[in-house]
Image: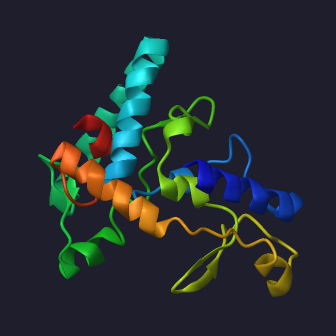
Amino acid sequence: MQIVDAALADAARRSGTWLACRPGCTQCCVGAFAISQLDAERLRAGFDQLTKDDPARASRVMERVRESVSRIAADFPGDIHTGILDDSPEAQEHFETFANDETCPVLDPETGMCDLYASRPMTCRVFGPPVRSEDGLGVCELCYHGANEEEIAACEMFLDTEDLENSLTSQAEAQTGQQGSTIVAFALLH
């Protein structure tokens, strides 16, 4: 996490005002996305700490988690008992449109802030600055208005953590006995 957070800080510094991400900006908090078992473990550890530090806030998070699961369970492209996403091509295709309007249950609707920000998944940590993928250089649609392609590329977030993340995810899967991806709501429910 420290490597990714440092890369984010560097990209944010180079991006300046083009990076619109600020506390209270919640567009990236809407829509279910897959997370690893390592991310799930981080979320659960963060939730356990929140339960100790602020039981009332933790209770509100868990209430939102249960409400979210009740809304999406019938259409969940995976096992609702384990929260593990099915990795078949059909299920993956279904996931592309699954729960796109579902707000993350960790988002506090009153403050617009993430109640588990320090424990947020990798997807959340890298959203906003330009990140390269097999589809090219992707950015949040709210960011980099007025910047040309070269200026955007100059702000690219460089990550060399895939091997480390995969190794740590394998360790988390071995430790928990859960293999495969899940989503935030099911990670916190199980």
Q: Position of residue 42 (x, y in %)?
A: 41, 40
What's the residue at 37%, 24% (across, down)? 48
How many numbered marks, from 0 up?
Answer: 0
Examine the rendered structure and indicate whether residue 156 appears above or below residue 71.
below
Q: Position of residue 106 (x, y in %)?
A: 46, 37
The colour scheme used here is rainbow
* Left or right of 139 on screen, residue 123: left
State which quarter of the image contains the C terminus. Answer: top left
* Left or right of 106 on screen, residue 154: right
What's the residue at 20%, 55% (across, down)? 84
Q: Position of residue 110 (x, y in %)?
A: 59, 29
Residue 162 shows in this picture: yes
Residue 148 shows in this picture: no
108 or 174, nearer to the observer:
174
What's the residue at 31%, 37% (across, down)? 188
Examine the rendered structure and indicate whether residue 14 appears above or below residue 178.
below
Q: Position of residue 87 (x, y in %)?
A: 20, 71
What's the residue at 52%, 31% (across, down)? 115
39 or 22, nearer to the observer:
39
Examine the rendered structure and indicate whether residue 59 appears above or below residue 151.
above
Figure quadrant of residue 13: bottom right
161 or 63, nearer to the observer:
161
* Left or right of 50 on screen, residue 97: left
